[in-house]
Amino acid sequence: MLLLLGLCLGLPLCAGSLEEAKSWGDTSEQVGLRVPRQVRLLQRLKTKPLMTEFSVKSTIISRYAFTTVSCRMLNRASEDQEIEFLMQIPAAAFITNFTMLIGDKVYQGEITEREKKNGDKIKEKRNKTTEDNGEKGTEIFRASVVIPSKDKAVFLLSYEELLQRRLGKYEHVISVRPQQLVGKLMVEVNILERSGIASLEVLPLLNSRQKGSGRAEGGARPPPSTVVNQNETFAKVFFKPSVIQQARIAQNGILGDFIIQYDVNREQSIGDIQVLNDYFVHYFAPKDLPPLPKNVVFVLDSSASMVGTKLRQTKDALFTILHDLRSQDHFSIIGFSNRIKVWKDHLVSVTPDNIRDAKVYIHHMSPTGGTDINGALQRAIRLLNNYVAHNDIEDRTVSLIIFLTDGKPTVGETHTVKILNNTKEAARGKICIFTIGIGNDVDFKLLEKLSLENCGLTRRVHEEEDAGSQLIGFYDEIRTPLLSDIRIDYPASLVEQATRTLFPNYFNGSEIIIAGKLVDRKMDRLHVEVTASNSKKFVVLKTDVPMEPQKAGNDVTGNARPKGDEEEDSNPLRRLWSYLTVKELLSAWLQSDNEQEKEQLRQKAQALAVNSHFLTPFTAIKLKKPLQLKKLEDPYGMSAATGPETVMQSLQGSNLQPGPALKKPYNPRIKVSKTSADGDPHFVVDFALNKLTVCFNIDGQPGDILRLVSDHSDSGVTVNGELIGAPAPPNGHKKQRTYFRTITILVNKPERSYLEVTPRRVILDGGDRLVLPCNQSVVVGSRGLEVSVSANANVTVTIQGTVAFVILIHLYKKPAPYQRDHLGFYISSSKGLSGNCHGLLGQFLNQDARLTGEPARPSKNATSPPLPKAGGGSETVLKVKGHQVPVVWKQRKIYNGEEQIDCWFARNATQLLDGEYKDYLAAHPFDSETTFGLGIPRGL
């Protein structure tokens, strides 16, 4: 088995086929004469891997999110195929587990120390990618594996992240990009906040978070099928779009980002402090404070590379920002290329005249020359230092630099380390630098380190995005500083290993989070003291927090945990503390220039990441030797097909699923039962209430049109199937084979509609005539009739939401003489059909059946084979609809050969059916007449 795993920036997809890509360029394929190119293309398309399920479950406990992704795929090709699983995850998240189920083997991931030799471990790629790959704040996890022909694969990915509060809201983003329509698609998010949920909103699906601010417009609705249930402290959000709803959003399966925004109640000025077992977390987000005055210098790249849209958008954004400055703020503007151009050699106050003059200066900026990053930063820092020194206002204002560039340093000092050292020495920790990098040529690592070392933040704007809206959105996060020089203290005798407790600034709408370990649990109170400066005074807040003895219960995260984990690993506060600590160690390692210190930081971060199962630059995922699965029952109904999904046998291994994430899968909109007519044709009837499955054969003639479902007088539904002939296989007992070439459906209520399905096309005539090729996925609806085509796989027909049929498409790449492209007919839902329904299948839909005269059974399961009595004994007889029919035990393959079922086989079908064979022959494909009366069975 070929296996390639990786974490990188990349295209936000969830499934694909490398084999398919290869096949498009394969011109050496030998084909027979007179085989049209369209047919060869159709045959190739059929080999595309089918995703049967894509589900995501997130559990958010006190802002800390546990997310598990489950993706199930089927290799429909007749040869082994390489399948790629990709999932876009937030850049701030840590992957905690990855497991694959390939056929009956389980490959479970284990977080280990990263070695120089990658071997079979995940490669974490953080290098720049092409401009149309990746999205801001996200990374791509990818796994590529070879799947045997007709086999199945399950990918389980778990990751964790601490949600950051921005502009007064937490935002949880889940990528829903399966890249094809999926029969079972589900997103479930559970939110538990002890302090109470103040607001919650589900935004419309967003396909690119860079284009625009990512905020919902007024009146924008959640995605279709979204359901929100919430009380004071708990919320549950479901997103379960049907195939039709998915297709209306995006027929290529790239739905976008499912985004939930929420905030919590805040009552205490000192914040919300939570304690669980030996860990605590402190959320500090004060409000109703007067804003601190800002001293801000806008530093804009005006080099030649900024020509065109980028510079125009940046100018427009600055016009907006200038009008947002408060009267107590002071500002200046610097444009730089190979020359440093300062608007004013000092900071000026915010007045109408100064705003007007600044806009004129910005308007006349023109792109030219190179990029002197070091010179521009030094000039900006000098402006701020001079202003603060001459006005003696350091403790009552916040000094900021907003720095925007699209390139690398090309003029002046170009050495990265020198630029960083020069900036750090000049700023002296008193000036925060916020950087924005535009495009693909920017030195983003330099900008990231500039912000890290100087108490700022950084953002990346891709080439095709609106730089102006990103700049405005970034500025909105820092436009209102409320506190500076924040220090949070806890008793040293009670708390150890606390995360960062010193913060230069607190901006309105954000949040400060500290976590730590408690060493003395005999104490019943935790003393907390916060000191900070605001615009008018020095602030001191003190409180004692009760520490009630609490125990972590079961793992409520829904994540799969390797066996042997300590009990505390299910403590969400312990996970949160580990997350923050590892993040801070990684940040310190990135900033350090001392090799000995960097190695110590690396070792600490690595040890904690391994212990916490976090995938970081210092750890890797090693796949354990595969485990063999025993055959289990199908607890998740994977033998059901929904929408365009090809029906398939259950994926085994339920005991390895991630706990609550899959314990309660939603009931699919359409469930395919065993009741069907497929193959030669072989008929199967499932009497679900009686736990009996009966099968029989009909030996028709080519050209015969069989009545499968006849309910024209009541529900208005009729289904007929036309047979096509083929020679019998060599040495077979039959003279010929027959298959269904065409399935026709007539719907008479509320209005008359016709549907004709062949292996090549679907014709829908419901007032307007539509011809749909079967090699393209599409969903259409007309007069209560909805038709979903999954390319070269199946056609799902839904009538008034109460009757549903699935028609499987069987295509042969190189058919034998006795094979023909044909159809299989399956009844998914018969709720809307009446008790008078008839036809070869319809007559059994609302009937009871039982076995008599059978020997004793080995179990209570009615579908178990009987044990024959010694000396022969009585035969097994099936009683249904007044008929008594001898039956024998048999196994039969259905669902395109993917599932083998046990059934009671009636050798003489005429004894089982009402009437004779000729009574089930239709005069034409849309013939809705029936020989039988209203539910009155006719004997032979």
Image (cartoon, rainbow, N blue to C red):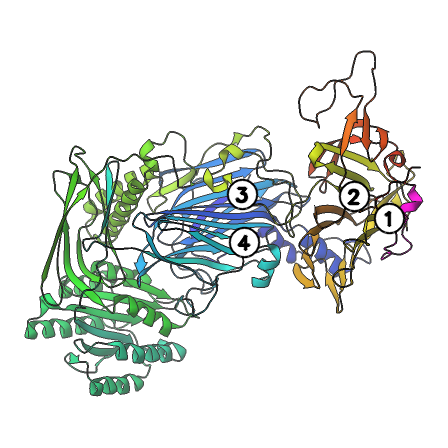
Instruction: Looking at the image, tell me whether mark 4 or mark 2 is earlier in sequence order.
Output: 4
Badges 3 and 1: C-beta atoms under 8 Å apart?
no
For the residues marked 3 and 1, what is the alpha-carbon distance in whole angstroms?
37 Å
Mark 4, residue position: 178
Mark 3, residue position: 665
Question: For numbered disc 4, what is the local secondary structure?
Answer: loop
Residue 454 position in % (x across, y down): 20, 61
Q: Residue furthest top?
A: 871
Name the foreground residue: 419 vs 366: 366
Instruction: Looking at the image, tell me whether mark 4 or mark 1 is earlier in sequence order.
Output: 4
Name the foreground residue: 249 vs 136: 249
Question: For numbered disc 3, what is the local secondary structure?
Answer: loop
For the residues marked 2 and 3, what is the alpha-carbon distance in whole angstroms?
28 Å
Residue 928 part of the magenta segment: yes
- The residue lying at 14 percent from left, 80 percent from top is 346
Residue 150 position in % (x across, y down): 66, 41
What kind of residue is marked 1?
Answer: Leu
Q: Which residues are magenta?
A: 916-931
- Mark 4, other Cα within 10 Å: few <14 / some 14–19 / many ≥20: many
Name the foreground residue: 379 vs 206: 206
Mark 2, residue position: 677
- Give the mark count: 4
For the residues marked 3 and 4, what is the alpha-carbon distance in whole angstroms?
18 Å
Instruction: Looking at the image, tell me whether mark 1 or mark 2 is earlier in sequence order.
Output: 2
What kind of residue is marked 3?
Answer: Pro
Mark 1, residue position: 706
Q: Is residue 406 visible?
A: no
Left or right of 309? Residue 816 is right
Badges 4 and 1: C-beta atoms under 8 Å apart?
no
